[in-house]
């Protein structure tokens, strides 16, 4: 009886365990079936599944076959998950490839427009006559010219000695009055300074006396006055006149002085006049100062024409001559000139040869003592198309270019090659003789093209 009760209890316990295990397993499967698929890559869900307490107990009670079946399902779930990840990755990769192809296609389509060069309106400037006049645009017809190789040298502006005079007294005197100041522009025969001299006073008195005697003799006539007295009177007058004139009075001043004809006017005062039109370059004196003969009171010079003294090596000097064309750079400005003098002796210190270049300076851009840069054309020349430097500009890609007038008021850029630059002139290649290019105002034309050079695709 006890054995039967024991067997029944074991069977009941086993049956209950099986039922509970089966119910838990079925419940777990139902939960798995009912649970929605989680976000890709959420491996935490699988970890929870593996560590589920009920399932852990189930693995302990179930046989190995059940264990293997569950592992296969779990593995399959992982495989499915990986497969889904791979699929997503592949799709993403294909999507990127599609995007690259579209992007490439978009760029190809953009290139198909030909860039700025294919848009005619983007590389052409059409200007009105008003714009040309306001911008000061000037054109020139291209011709073949000769351009000498450039010899460069430093230079210094100096007064033109042939257009400069110095004001000096011929007798000891004292400065009584100044009539002009440093930097003033004066005219020829304009009074510069009034001096007073004892020697001049004596000469003036002698002139008045000689003039009175000559007038008396002439009035009496040769019938009354002997010939000797008549000659002596004339000689005395000429000597007195020459002396006053030599001391600094001009014939006009002497004539005015004699018109007064009184000895009281022989004060010894007289004025020094300017010999030329020009600018007062120096006036190294003060009123009241005693001046010796030959002392320079003032220098007057015509600054409209200056000399530029350049120093060359003996080798470079052999390639130029008087009359050679030269260009002088003052700041950003170039001025045309020519060689007017060449010295034949080398400077003992620098061992260089000085040449004088004459330039026009009407607008007073250059001043004596100013240092400049000189380019002299040598006798070794080349023939070709010569343009002013301001006609040639840099393109956006760094090449040299000019603007050709292809139709009235229509300008197109054209690339050229610069062979040589001599001062403000360029020898170039890439243009045909007879073409019309912008000679002045190229930067304005370039800016007008740049304004219209926008990209219609916003790239």
Image: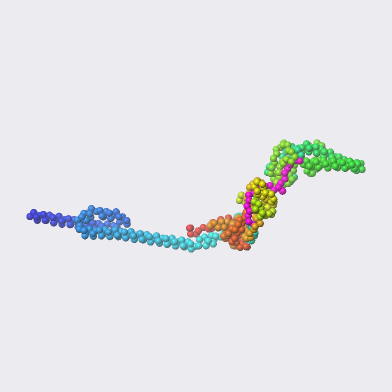
- Residue drawn where x is 69% and y is 48% of the image: 160
Q: Nearer the viewer, residue 387 or 321?
A: 321
- Residue drawn where x is 15% and y is 57% of the image: 15
Q: Quadrant of the N terminus?
A: bottom left
**Quadrant housing residue 259:** top right
Q: Does the magenta stretch include residue 152?
A: yes
**Quadrant housing residue 193:** top right
- Using residue 174 as the reference point, say whether residue 67 is left or right of it: left
Q: Nearer the viewer, residue 366 or 26?
A: 366
Q: Where is residue 431 in the image (x, y as percent from the top left)?
A: 60, 61
Q: Residue furthest left?
A: 1
- Residue 162: tell me if it is visible: yes
Q: Main secondary structure of the magenta part?
A: strand
Q: Where is residue 265 in the image (x, y as percent from the top left)?
A: 80, 37
- Using residue 218 as the reference point, say whether residue 39 is left or right of it: left
Q: Nearer the viewer, residue 55 or 313?
A: 313
Q: Position of residue 385 (x, y in %)?
A: 62, 60
Q: Where is residue 292 in the image (x, y as percent from the top left)?
A: 74, 38
Q: Is residue 9 magenta?
A: no
- Residue drawn where x is 84% and y is 38% of the image: 209
Colouring rule applied to residues: rainbow
Magenta span: 148-170
């Amino acid at each position: 009886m006890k054995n039967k009760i024991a067997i029944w209890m074991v069977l009941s316990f086993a049956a209950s365990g099986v039922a509970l295990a089966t119910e838990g397993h079925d419940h777990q499967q139902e939960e798995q079936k009912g649970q929605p698929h989680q976000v890709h890559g959420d491996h935490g869900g699988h970890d929870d599944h593996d560590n589920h307490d009920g399932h852990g107990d189930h693995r302990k009670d179930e046989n190995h076959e059940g264990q293997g079946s569950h592992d296969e399902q779990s593995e399959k779930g992982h495989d499915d998950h990986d497969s889904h990840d791979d699929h997503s990755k592949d799709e993403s990769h294909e999507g990127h490839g599609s995007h690259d192809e579209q992007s490439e296609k978009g760029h190809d389509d953009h290139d198909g427009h030909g860039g700025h060069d294919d848009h005619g309106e983007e590389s052409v400037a059409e200007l009105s006559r008003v714009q040309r006049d306001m911008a000061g645009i000037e054109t020139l017809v291209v011709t073949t010219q000769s351009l000498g190789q450039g010899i460069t040298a430093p230079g210094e502006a100096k007064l033109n000695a042939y257009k400069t005079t110095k004001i000096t007294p011929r007798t000891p005197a004292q400065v009584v009055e100044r009539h002009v100041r440093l930097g003033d522009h004066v005219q020829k025969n304009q009074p510069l300074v009034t001096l007073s001299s004892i020697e001049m006073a004596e000469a003036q008195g002698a002139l008045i006396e000689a003039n009175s005697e000559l007038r008396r003799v002439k009035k009496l006539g040769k019938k009354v006055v002997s010939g000797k007295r008549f000659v002596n009177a004339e000689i005395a007058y000429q000597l007195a006149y020459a002396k006053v004139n030599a001391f600094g009075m001009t014939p006009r001043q002497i004539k005015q002085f004699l018109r007064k004809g009184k000895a009281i006017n022989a004060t010894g005062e007289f004025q020094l006049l300017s010999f030329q039109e020009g600018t007062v370059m120096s006036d190294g004196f003060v009123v009241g100062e005693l001046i010796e003969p030959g002392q320079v009171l003032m220098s007057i010079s015509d600054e409209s024409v200056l000399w530029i003294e350049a120093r060359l090596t003996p080798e470079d000097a052999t390639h130029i001559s008087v009359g050679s064309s030269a260009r002088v750079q003052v700041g950003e400005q170039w001025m045309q000139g020519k060689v007017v003098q060449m010295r034949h002796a080398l400077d003992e210190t620098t061992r260089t040869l000085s040449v004088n270049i004459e330039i026009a300076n009407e607008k007073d851009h250059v001043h004596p003592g100013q240092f400049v840069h000189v380019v002299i054309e040598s006798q070794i020349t080349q023939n070709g198309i010569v343009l002013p430097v301001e006609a040639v500009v840099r393109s956006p890609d760094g090449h040299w270019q000019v603007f050709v007038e292809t139709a009235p008021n229509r300008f197109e850029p054209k690339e050229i090659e610069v062979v040589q630059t001599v001062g403000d002139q360029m020898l170039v290649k890439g243009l045909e003789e007879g073409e019309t290019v912008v000679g002045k105002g190229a930067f304005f034309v370039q800016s007008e093209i740049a304004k219209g050079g926008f990209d219609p695709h916003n790239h």
